[in-house]
């Protein structure tokens, strides 16, 4: 067993969310002895969101395991090239390659959620009935909470990636992937495609788009396995 310090776990949220979406998985990891922090970026621009991840890395110890949900998969793909990052965990996430935007990926495998979105004041808002396709396996009460606390991204956020070849972390860092087979936000076939492309260790779960809320034990288990591999690697 390595005596290396346990990796820090840094969570990166998707759109229509903030760092509190990881509230069910943070305490068990803290109890394991990990330093844990959830990045709070503003979904105003991809460049600034990635910069916020890097500023957060400056506040914690290394090595770091970056965990990205949904759009957070794009931010960890870019920020993960930092030398302090030892591994990547994607949760029902996108994962662009060089020159590829998040929108490019979503266009390949359209999903139901985008029929429940309204653009207003320059932001992309989820309609109240959108939670059916975002968090449909949560209770009605919890779905209402998800909607009440959702945070709308700038309307063109998914068109802003186009990373260069040297900014694709999954090409050089080990990766794990939680694949949500009942997802109506990031299509399961898109998840399967990106996870296969990156050569990730995949765990499938019969979940909506938010397995960290509906199946937190599965997500924690994957992160524990990734953390152990990073620590002992």
Image (cartoon, rainbow, N blue to C red):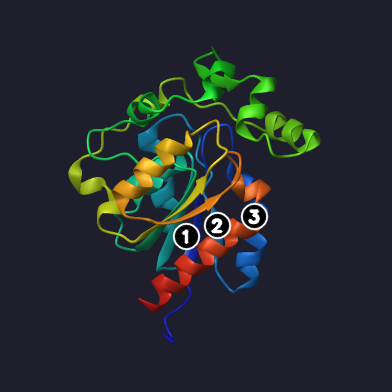
The reply to whether callout 2 and callout 1 are in contact (CB within 8 Å) is yes
Q: CA distance from mark 1 to mark 3?
A: 26 Å
Point out the frontmost of discs 2 and 1.
2
- Mark 2–mark 3 distance (CA, rounded to whole Å): 17 Å
User: Which one is in front, 214 or 31?
Assistant: 214
Which residue: 32% across, 46% down?
78
Residue 141 percent coordinates (x, y): 80, 35
Answer with mark 2 or mark 3, whichever residue precedes in sequence: 2
Taking the spot 34% from the left edge, 47% from the top edge, the residue there is 77
Other residues around mark 3 within 10 Å, as few (<14) / some (14–19) / many (≥20): some
According to the image, label 1 marks what residue?
59
Where on the picture, by quarter, is residue 202?
bottom left
Image position of 120 with respect to 47: above or below: above
Instruction: Please name the residue shown 64% across and 55% down the image.
Output: 216
How far is disc 2 from disc 1 in space, using C-alphas? 9 Å
Where in the figure is residue 190, as x and y percent of width and height? 40, 36
Sequence-first tag of 1 and 3: 1
As helix, strand or loop, the secondary structure at mark 3 comes to helix
User: Disc 1 vs disc 3: which is toward the camera?
Assistant: 3
Q: Is residue 106 left or right of residue 40?
A: left
Q: What label sits on residue 216 in the rendered view? A: 3
Q: Residues within 10 Å of mark 2 (few under 14, many from 20)?
A: some
Q: In the structure shown, which secondary structural element does the residue marked by tag 2 occupy?
A: strand
Front-lying residue, 182 or 129: 182
Q: Decide if residue 124 is in sight here.
A: yes
Instruction: Please say whether residue 7 is visible from this viewpoint.
Output: no
Residue 57, given in percent of the width and then of the height, sits at 42, 57
Q: Which mark is on residue 108? A: none
On the image, numbered disc 2 is attached to which residue? 37
């Amino acid at each position: 067993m390595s005596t290396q310090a346990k990796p820090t776990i840094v969570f990166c949220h998707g759109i229509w969310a903030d760092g509190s979406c990881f509230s069910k998985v943070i305490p068990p990891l803290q109890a394991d002895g990990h330093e844990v922090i959830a990045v709070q970026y503003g979904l105003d621009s991809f460049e600034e969101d990635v910069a916020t991840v890097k500023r957060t890395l400056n506040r914690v110890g290394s090595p770091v395991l970056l965990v990205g949900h949904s759009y957070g998969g794009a931010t960890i793909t870019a920020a993960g090239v930092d030398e302090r990052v030892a591994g990547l965990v994607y949760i029902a996430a996108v994962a662009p390659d060089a020159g590829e935007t998040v929108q490019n990926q979503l266009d390949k495998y359209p999903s139901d959620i985008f029929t429940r979105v309204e653009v207003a004041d320059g932001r992309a808002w989820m309609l109240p009935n959108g939670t059916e396709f975002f968090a449909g396996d949560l209770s009605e009460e919890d779905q209402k909470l998800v909607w009440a606390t959702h945070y709308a991204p700038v309307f063109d956020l998914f068109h802003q990636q186009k990373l260069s070849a040297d900014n694709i972390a999954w090409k050089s860092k080990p990766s794990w992937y939680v694949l949500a087979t009942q997802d109506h936000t990031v299509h399961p076939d898109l998840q399967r495609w990106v996870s296969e492309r990156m050569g990730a260790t995949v765990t499938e779960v019969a979940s909506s788009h938010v397995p960290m809320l509906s199946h937190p034990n599965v997500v924690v288990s994957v992160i524990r396995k990734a953390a152990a591999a990073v620590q002992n690697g």
